[in-house]
Image (cartoon, rainbow, N blue to C red):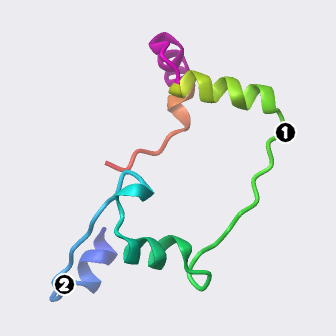
Amino acid sequence: NKLLKSSLKNKKTHITRFKGLGEMNPKTLWNTTLDPNNRNLLKIQIDNEKKALNTFKDILGKDASARYSLIQENAHRLELDV
């Protein structure tokens, strides 16, 4: 934050956040995500598919207690950007 404030001290800035790609207008989506000159693609390999599917089920499923348990067990690993 300090670096951002000092480098942009006399410049007008506008920072926008999107919750998902569907909220972006086509030009912004191209510039930030789809343009091959600007994007970085990383291959993801899932070693334990069953465990990954269960985790997604816990996160996105209707059972709030499973989601709560997952958050409680992993909260120490998070870095919040508030």
The answer to if 67 sits in the magenta stretch is yes
- Give the x, y percent position of residue 27: 39, 78
Q: 70 or 75, which lies in front?
A: 70
Q: Give neighbour class at mark 2: few <14, some 14-19, many 20+ (Cα, 10 Å).
A: few
Cα–Cα span, label 2 and label 1: 47 Å
> Residue 12 sits in which quadrant?
bottom left
Q: Secondary structure at mark 1?
A: loop
Q: Marks 1 and 2: in contact by CB < 8 Å?
A: no
Q: Is residue 60 magenta?
A: no
Q: Nearer the viewer, mark 2 or mark 1?
A: 1
Q: Residue at x 50, y 40 (%)?
A: 78
Residue type, mark 2 in image: Lys
- Find residue 55 and report its horizontal and vertical position in percent: 64, 27
Label 2 secondary element: loop
The crowding category of the residue bearing disc 1, from other C-alpha atoms within 10 Å (few below 14, some 14 to 19, many at least 20), is few
Q: Which mark is residue 62?
A: none
Q: Three-letter amino acid code at disc 1?
A: Asp
Q: Give the vertical position of 49 relative to 25 (above or below).
A: above
Q: Please state, as top left, top right, bottom left or bottom right, where the N terminus lies in the image.
A: bottom left
The residue where tag 1 is placed is 47
Magenta part mainly helix, strand or loop? helix
Q: Is residue 17 left or right of residue 32?
A: left
* Magenta residues (range): 61-73
Q: Give left or right: position of 68 versus 43.
A: left
Q: Residue at x 44, y 58 (%)?
A: 21
Q: Is residue 25 above or below residue 52?
A: below
Residue topped by disc 2: 9
Question: In the figure, residue 40 lies in which quadrant?
Answer: bottom right
| Residue at 41% from the left image edge and 53% from the top image edge | 20
